Image (cartoon, rainbow, N blue to C red):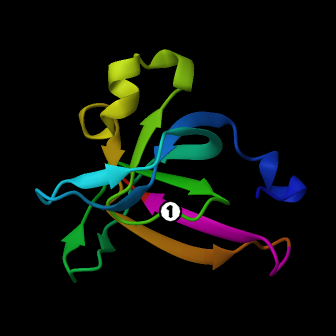
Amino acid sequence: MISNRLSKFYKDDCVYWEVTGMDGFGNPVFNPGVQLKVLWNTNEKLIVNDLGETIKPESVLFTSQKMGNGDYLFKGLLTDLTSTQLLEPKATGNRILATAESHSLLSVLDVLYEVYL
């Protein structure tokens, strides 16, 4: 849940699909897309992903919602998407490449996630 202290910084709308597992063919299965507020920025730094590879993702976003590698995000509103797009995040959204957890400078109770796309 977004803390009141952090929510004022989240100005961008996005749709988030969480991977819940794999189907019988090895394709990801997703929870339905949900609307979130985040802070979405252009990324300027290199990071090391979970595989130990150095990469330069296009975007970084900050959120109070825990997200995982392989989940998908779309910058915009649920109402921007067709019913087909809502069911196919891989065709619409950006795959999360790496995530990092840190604490807000405001409080150790406010968890802030960095998400790289």
Q: Is residue 98 left or right of residue 67?
A: left
Residue 77 in view here:
no
Q: In which quadrant of the rendered view does residue 63 lie?
A: bottom right
Relative to 101, is 65 above or below? Answer: above
- Is the residue marked by circle 1 packed among few (<14), some (14-19), or many (20+) residues within 10 Å? many
Q: Is residue 5 left or right of residue 117?
A: right
- Residue at position x 70%, y 44% from top? 10
- Residue corresponding to mark 1: 67
Q: Position of residue 100 (x, y in %)?
A: 49, 73
User: For this rendering, which residue is in front, 27 or 109?
Assistant: 27
Q: In which quadrant of the rendered view does residue 82 lie?
A: top left
Relative to 5, is 91 above or below? Answer: above
The residue range painted magenta reads 107-115
**Residue projecting furthest to the front:** 24
- Residue at position x 47%, y 60% from top? 115
Query: Could you tell me the amino acid type at mark 1?
Result: Met
